[in-house]
Amino acid sequence: MLKEQTAIVTGGSRGIGRAICLELAQKGADIALVYAGNTQAAEETAAACRALGVKAQCYQCDVADFEAVKETVGKIKADFGGVQILVNNAGVTRDGLLAAMKQADFDAVIDTNLKGAFHFIRHVTPLMMRARYGRIVNISSVSGIMGNAGQTNYSASKAGLIGLTKATARELAGRNVTCNAVAPGFIATDMTKALVEKNSEAIVGSIPLGRVGNPEDVAKAVSFLAGPDSTYITGEVLRVDGGMAM
Ligand code: NAP
């Protein structure tokens, strides 16, 4: 169903991004996997994609670096031909209370989570506009919808992604490029491991469906928005949170 399409997945080495790579590969998409530094995890995920019969290649690139992203998109275009799907998933946390939040921690989170998505959209959309086809999915968070104490930087970055998604959706709709966001709740990955282990009861208690999510729960929503069953959906924010933020 996604055969002969190429998907860029940022932060594809681990966690939610890994599950997105595998889900899209399962549907037949070739995968350009972007990661920060964990080459072993990236190569392992790419190998798992190739085992599903698609082409998969890894690109080490800091999404926060505008010029590095430009260069990486150029390499991906040369290696794959075109790009039909872009999933902006790379993200970090630098949690801390507002009163003690360091400027560097605020900037690092905005630079990676929000500007990183802008950088990829900026460099990939000329290809999509020319082809008059594209599917962009940005990974936001319930923190960007509800706000979360101790995460002013992260919540701001994830709320910003929702604005970026809607403005991009309006600008590119005329070129048949859709742009949507997925807002996960608590998902079991490296990012949340310590928090979930420490506060398991309180966290599960705040989720109507009574469980923490799996990376695959998010990947299925992303693959829907990246595929042929969502052609009339753009500018949407799809929560995948077990009902947490309703
Ligand atoms: P994770 O397990 O910590 O993985 C983060 C991924 O992002 C890794 O692949 C990492 O690459 C990559 N990355 C980080 N900084 C990067 C940079 N500057 N340039 C390129 N790649 C970078 O995180 P996750 O839990 O899967 O989260 C994935 C996304 O979902 C994030 O945007 C996160 O904010 C969002 N989210 C997660 C949850 C949750 O509960 N887990 C909830 C809501 C939203 P390396 O492996 O090379 O380090």
Image (cartoon, rainbow, N blue to C red):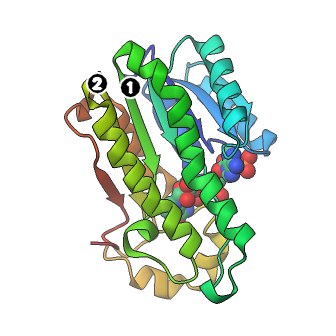
Ligand 1 picture quarter: bottom right
Asked whether the beta carbons under mark 2 and mark 1 sit within 8 Å of each other, the answer is yes
Q: Which one is in front, 35 or 112? A: 112
Visible in this render: residue 224? no
For label 1, the crowd category at 10 Å Cα-Cα, with few meaning under 14, some 14 to 19 and many 20 or more, is many
Residue 236 point in image, percent of width and height: 28, 49
Q: Residue at x 50, y 69 (%)?
A: 155
Q: Quadrant of the N terminus?
A: top left
Q: Is residue 117 above or below residue 178?
A: below
Count the marks: how many? 2
* Residue 80 visible (yes or no): yes
Q: Residue at x 58, y 82 (%)?
A: 150
User: Which label number is shown at residue 134?
Assistant: 1
Q: Position of residue 233 (x, y in %)?
A: 23, 39
Question: Residue 244, relative to residue 199: is it above or below?
Answer: above
User: Does 118 sit above or below residue 200?
Assistant: above
Between the C-alphas of marks 2 and 1, the distance is 7 Å
Q: Secondary structure at mark 2?
A: loop
Instruction: Give the label on residue 227, or none.
Output: none
Task: Identify the mark nearer the N-term, 2 or 1.
Answer: 1
Using the image as rendered, state which of residue 58 and residue 202 is in the foreground: 58
| Number of residues whose C-alpha sits closer than 10 Å to that of mark 2, classed few (under 14), some (14–19) or many (20 or more) | some
**Residue plotted at (54% across, 44% down):** 117
Measured as percent of width and height from the top left, residue 76 is found at 63, 20
Q: Amino acid at mark 1?
A: Gly
Task: Give x and y (percent) for residue 143.
Answer: 45, 70
Residue at 61% of width from left, 84% of height from top?
98
* Quarter of the figure that contains the C terminus: bottom left
- What is the three-letter code of the residue carrying label 2? Asn
Pointer 2 residue: 176
Residue 130 is left or right of residue 201, and the answer is left
Q: In the picture, residue 159 is in which quadrant?
A: bottom left
